[in-house]
């Protein structure tokens, strides 16, 4: 028998809100129904896109949440007649059209055909493959076309692995598209379906919205009906029941970056100290390659997932290892890489284990053993899913219900491209003008020294 999820599980400070949330549900429903009726009879599309420049990241999502008690509808801005993104240098992205999904905004086509350069609204240059000797003809550059510098790697990796000085691009690019929150196009490596979830957390951090965790799930705008799609305690018990193994780590890069070397040595120490860890990928003995279905089916059987990044204390570097491989799988991430401050402001509370909180490998191992034996304590790491936005996808639980199978989109690339197409559809590139005077200062100059140290001690 699996234990029931007791009410105490929802921490004291949440409990009141949980009750309030429930009582508000009925009211919220009435309001939502009314809003839906009004919308239904409105025949005109309203463009609510805010007049903010891409630099002003605070206020540019057309899927705005409300700050309080009322739900607002999602309003899709009209599609421009064409919307084309050109990938200048090859990027291994597998879609040629950004999905037209309410959470994505999408609708732009993606091409790698350089002969379409002049038609393109945005030209995306990937850090790895872009060199000063292979750029578009400057005479054909149009002022309302955005050149976007794109990377998913850390400044460490671009500096010491790809040897990018970046000084050759002074004044060249208009926008950056990276996981960092100071980017013009925020390409956080999460399922785009939960983008507004993330934005709401950001608002909370900026103090612009009511504390959304306290407000509970009903305060959020969602294109989906929360009541229908939110996880239930049964869902969480189902998730627990499918956990057959303790901990998994999947990694291909064990020594290419200073961070990767460090994480590999930590993992080795843990294994030597007796941790029962299954290692997948090139760094381990298990299958080195699995397709995404095999990967997600296999990994969802583990209670803990080692979300160890390949960079140490790089600003806001939290990747798909957390957003897909752990949260989507319903495994508790053990986080190493980001600073504690970044982890606590970017991830839902009580959703992860932070490696550096433990003084030695044994302490962590004992804690994992404890959680393995105490289902109630383990399930506390899932409480956020009951009280925060209801639609964070959980593999084979609510991913089908949220409107689209996440399997079509198991790509941490897509969210960034969704954001880029949103900006283009809002016409931000036509209304504003911007160029990045020093990419080097921006990318390296604002990074922490800890991240950029050539060697991690
Ligand atoms: C919330 O409700 C109160 C009272 O019902 C109202 O005064 C306030 O404007 C509402 N806030 C929002 C954001 O709708
Ligand atoms: C995208 O491509 C499809 C097929 O190639 C085309 O029919 C459509 O008009 C394009 N859409 C935009 C917005 O450019
Ligand atoms: C199991 O975890 C719960 C919740 O954290 C705690 O209250 C309880 O004391 C734990 N039980 C044991 C036997 O440690
Ligand atoms: C992009 O940068 C170029 C070069 O600085 C500039 O001429 C152009 O106006 C910028 N375009 C936009 C849309 O910001």
Image (cartoon, rainbow, N blue to C red):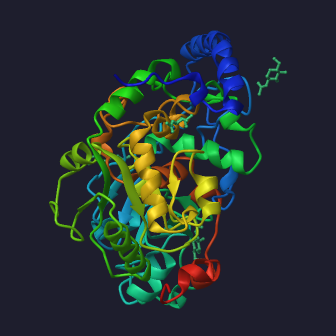
Task: Please tell me which residue lies in front, 27 or 271.
Answer: 271
Instruction: From this view, report whether residue 392 is shown above or below residue 349.
Output: above
Residue 345: image location, x then y, percent? 64, 54
Q: How many marks?
A: 0
Q: Quadrant of residue 162?
A: bottom left
Instruction: From this view, report whether residue 451 is shown above or below residue 424.
Output: below
Instruction: From this view, report whether residue 385 is shown above or below residue 258.
Output: above
Residue 59: image location, x then y, percent? 69, 48
Q: Quadrant of residue 66?
A: top right
Q: Is residue 81 visible?
A: no
Residue 373: image location, x then y, percent? 40, 40
Task: Please tell me which residue lies in front, 110 or 367.
Answer: 367
Task: Please tell me which residue lies in front, 404 or 39.
Answer: 404
Is residue 238 left or right of 60 when viewed as pictured? left
**Residue at image location 24% in from the left, 71% down from the top:** 283
Is residue 83 left or right of 200 when viewed as pictured? left
């Amino acid at each position: 028998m699996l234990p029931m999820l007791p009410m105490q599980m929802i921490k004291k400070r949440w409990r009141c809100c949980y009750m309030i949330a429930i009582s508000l549900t009925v009211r919220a429903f009435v309001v939502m129904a009314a809003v839906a009726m009004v919308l239904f009879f409105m025949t005109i599309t309203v463009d609510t896109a805010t007049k903010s420049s891409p630099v002003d990241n605070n206020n540019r999502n057309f899927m705005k949440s409300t700050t309080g008690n009322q739900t607002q509808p999602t309003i899709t801005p009209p599609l421009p007649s064409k919307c084309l993104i050109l990938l200048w240098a090859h990027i291994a992205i597998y879609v040629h059209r950004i999905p037209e999904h309410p959470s994505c905004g999408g609708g732009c086509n993606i091409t790698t055909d350089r002969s379409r350069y002049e038609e393109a609204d945005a030209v995306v240059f990937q850090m790895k493959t872009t060199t000063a000797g292979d750029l578009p003809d400057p005479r054909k550059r149009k002022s309302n076309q955005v050149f976007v510098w794109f990377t998913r790697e850390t400044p460490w990796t671009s500096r010491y692995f790809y040897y990018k000085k970046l000084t050759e691009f002074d004044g060249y690019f208009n926008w950056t598209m990276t996981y960092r929150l100071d980017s013009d196009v925020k390409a956080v490596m999460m399922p785009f379906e939960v983008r507004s979830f993330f934005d709401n957390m950001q608002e909370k951090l900026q103090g612009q919205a009511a504390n959304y965790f306290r407000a509970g799930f009903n305060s959020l705008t969602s294109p989906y009906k929360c009541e229908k799609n939110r996880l239930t305690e049964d869902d969480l018990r189902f998730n627990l029941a499918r956990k057959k193994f303790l901990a998994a780590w999947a990694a291909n890069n064990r020594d290419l970056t200073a961070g990767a070397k460090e994480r590999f040595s930590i993992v080795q120490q843990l294994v030597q100290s007796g941790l029962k860890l299954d290692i997948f990928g090139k760094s381990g003995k298990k299958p080195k390659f699995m397709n995404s279905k095999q990967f997600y089916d296999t990994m969802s059987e583990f209670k803990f997932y080692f979300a160890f990044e390949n960079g140490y204390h790089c600003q806001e570097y939290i990747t798909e290892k957390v957003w897909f491989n752990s949260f989507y799988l319903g495994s508790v991430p053990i986080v190493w890489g980001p600073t504690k401050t970044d982890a606590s402001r970017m991830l839902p509370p009580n959703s992860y284990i932070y490696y550096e909180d433990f003084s030695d490998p044994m302490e962590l191992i004992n804690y994992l053993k404890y959680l393995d034996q105490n289902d109630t304590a383990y399930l506390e790491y899932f409480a956020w899913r009951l009280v925060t936005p209801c639609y964070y996808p959980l593999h084979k639980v609510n991913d089908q219900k949220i409107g689209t199978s996440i399997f079509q989109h198991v790509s941490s690339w897509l969210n960034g491209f969704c954001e880029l197409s949103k900006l283009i559809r809002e016409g931000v590139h036509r209304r504003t003008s911007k160029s990045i005077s020093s990419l080097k200062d921006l990318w390296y100059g604002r990074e922490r020294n800890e991240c950029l140290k050539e060697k991690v001690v």
